[in-house]
Amino acid sequence: MNVILIGMMGSGKSTVGKLVAKKLNWEFYDSDQSIERQEQMSIERLFKKKGEKSFRALEKKMIRNLSLKDHSVIATGGGAPCFQENWDSFSKNGFVIYLKAEPLSLYKRLQKSSSRNRPLLKGDRLSKENISKLLAERKSYYQKAEMVLENDALSPGQTAARIVRAIKKLRGESL
Ligand code: S3P
């Protein structure tokens, strides 16, 4: 079984994912980072050089490969759940968790973090309005997750602890 983390940019997938993997003693993979390593190029440069369409094709391939793993926590890019092929991969061996946060929380977190990796919300594009718009477009895809975890008021550690509890319960392990 794998844990697949989905959600908007700034929802904490990578930070929380690393903590969950550590607590479960599982491997952690970040699909964006794996693509960057494979292509020897930042996501930002990939978008610029090859366009979003090429990035989405690489993302689909990467998610398909990562989904073959076991006992792994996989953080996906914010746009990945918008494509059915990625759900086909997720559902092979994955328990999908949506890290849900309000636009204002996402905005605050994204302002603090680097805009590297996030060409869709870079510079002038980083606004509450754009985040709300993107979230409205993606909501129905994100809601397909098996577990929805609202983390506006939770620290990454608290979010990770809730996920670990849910996974252990699911696997019938003692808490
Ligand atoms: C994207 C999110 C990014 C990255 C790319 C596109 C999106 O990942 O995959 O910039 O479409 O939401 P994070 O969600 O990890 O920031």
Image (cartoon, rainbow, N blue to C red):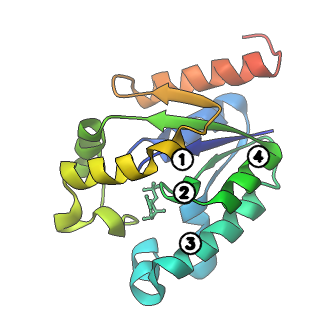
Kindly indicate whether the residue at mark 1 contacts the one at mark 2 (C-beta within 8 angstroms). yes
Ligand 1 lies under 8 Å from the Cβ of mark 1: no
What residue did someone put label 2 on? 82
Mark 4 or mark 1: whose residue is earlier in sequence: 4
Q: What element carries label 1?
A: helix
Residue 41 visible (yes or no): no
- Identify the residue at the far top of this view: 174
Which sits earlier in the primary sequence, circle 4 or circle 2? 2
Seen from this angle, which residue lies furthest bottom? 49
Point out which mark residue 91 bears.
Answer: 4
**What is the CA distance from the residue labelled 3 to the residue labelled 2?**
10 Å
52 is higher (above) or lower (below) than 153 = below
Q: What element carries label 4?
A: helix
Q: Mark 1 points at which residue?
A: 141
Which of the two discs, 3 and 2, labels the residue nearer the N terminus?
3
Chain-order first, disc 1 or disc 3: 3
Residue 119, placed above or below residue 46: above
Residue occupying image coordinates x 81% and y 44%: 93
User: Label 1 is placed on what type of residue?
Assistant: Tyr
Residue underneath mark 3? 56
Q: Quadrant of residue 25?
A: top right
Mark 4 and mark 3: Cα distance apart in space: 19 Å
Q: In which quarter of the image is residue 114?
A: bottom left
**Amino acid of disc 3:** Arg
Give the mark toward the camera: 3 or 2: 2
Does 53 sit above or below residue 113? below
Residue 137 position within the rendered picture, expressed as x and y whole percent measured from the top left: 40, 52
Q: Determine crowd level at label 4: few under 14, some 14-19, many 20+ residues with C-alpha closer than 10 A.
A: few
